[in-house]
Amino acid sequence: MSKEQELLSLINQRILKTTNLIKKEGADALIIYSEPNYRYLTNFTGEEAQLILTAAGDRILLSDSRFADQIKAQAPGELNVIMKHNSDYEEISKILKTLNLKKVLIEGEFVSATEYEKLKQLNPELNFEICEELVEQVRNVKDKLEIEALKKAINISMESFNEILPMIKVGAKEKDIAAKLDYLFKINGGDGPDFDTIVASGLRSAWAHGVASDKIIEDGDMIVIDFGSFYNGYAADITRTVSVGKVDPELKKIYEIVLEAQRRGIEKATRGNYGRDVDQAAREYIAQAGYGQYFGHGIGHGIGLELHELCQPSMPFAKQKLTDNMIHTVEPGIYLPEKGGVRIEDDVLINGEEPEVLSNLPKNELLSL
């Protein structure tokens, strides 16, 4: 089987799973506005499109002439491509009127109120209904090609991180470390950073999202580095905490607590458990150690075509039953105001009773470089 045939086979499986959900909602079609979602169902990576997917599995992609050749090159299988010349809602309405539809679902998170009202006005004969995270339900479980892409993104991220370790020393600037890391993602075969790289040192290490600044690293600093590269559209997400020089004993103490909390969380990342089991295992250990109030965020989230998955409003990670081929982060942290913080994050593949940690960078070896 060629790569194109393999891709088409997987896309057809994705379409089938999505159309089953459309039918479950008693609908005849779904209008998709989300770029990751239409990419998932077509392999088209352009930023200007909408996809109509019928319950029968027919796909109609609306884009414009800028992307005609790209669609032809990227999207395998039977796909009706319409080049738009008017507004999105006018072009979508034209298509809807050619189909024998009664009930149409629309991605509520991605369509504007104006667009929704215009569609209803132009198509009074149709019953429109907002849906939430329908395609995302299918995307939560990764197929073979997605797992390969995520593993590649993670490996590129780790290789790049190892290359910037010599830069982490007294006198280095946070922004310089982040810039070099972002550069190396592309040099090492990735698509570039999938978020603003976090390099937060000293007191700033207690900032959970301390994006790299002009701060200079000083002796005794803890440095939280949260990073990840895209590869073929898929996002890695890893965090390591590094230290330089003589570190405050309490910061070393919380490092060991976070490391053990993460180990306990990963241990629970098995088929049949829920996200809350992963969270509780880590959170209870941190609380028992006396630092519960300093761990204020969730234990993790899914990764894939988006950096944050398995965490949508209708599908929070805590309530998700873990199934094989889900990939999510486990990232406990302790953040002490006016002192510093620690976070350790790895990407984990659900694989039966034995979690598969995909990111295997050193941990304790990064203290006092």
Image (cartoon, rainbow, N blue to C red):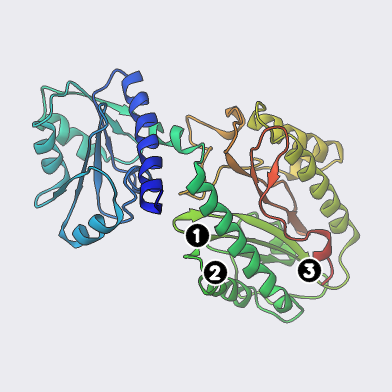
Cα distance between the residues tagged 1 and 2: 8 Å
Task: Left or right? Give the position of 217 relative to 183.
Answer: right
> For the residue carrying disc 2, how many other residues have a C-alpha within 10 Å: few (<14), some (14-19), or many (20+)?
many
- Confirm or deny contact between disc 2 and disc 3 (CB under 8 A): no
Q: Quadrant of residue 134?
A: top left
Task: Give the spatial CA distance, label 1 vs label 3.
Answer: 29 Å
**What number is the disc on residue 230?**
1
Q: Please, what is the three-letter code of the amino acid marked with disc 2? A: Phe
Q: Nearer the viewer, mark 1 or mark 3?
A: 1
Q: Are marks 1 and 2 in contact (CB under 8 Å)?
A: yes
Mark number, residue 185: 2
Does residue 287 appear to the left or right of 49 in the view shown? Answer: right
Residue name at image x 63 percent, y 74 percent: 177
Q: Vertically, is 35 above or below 251?
A: above
Q: CA distance from mark 2 to mark 3?
A: 25 Å
Residue 1 vertical placement versus 121 (above, below) = below
Query: Where 294 sits versus 312, above or below?
Result: below
Q: Secondary structure at mark 3?
A: loop
Rendered location of residue 272, percent (x, y): 65, 26
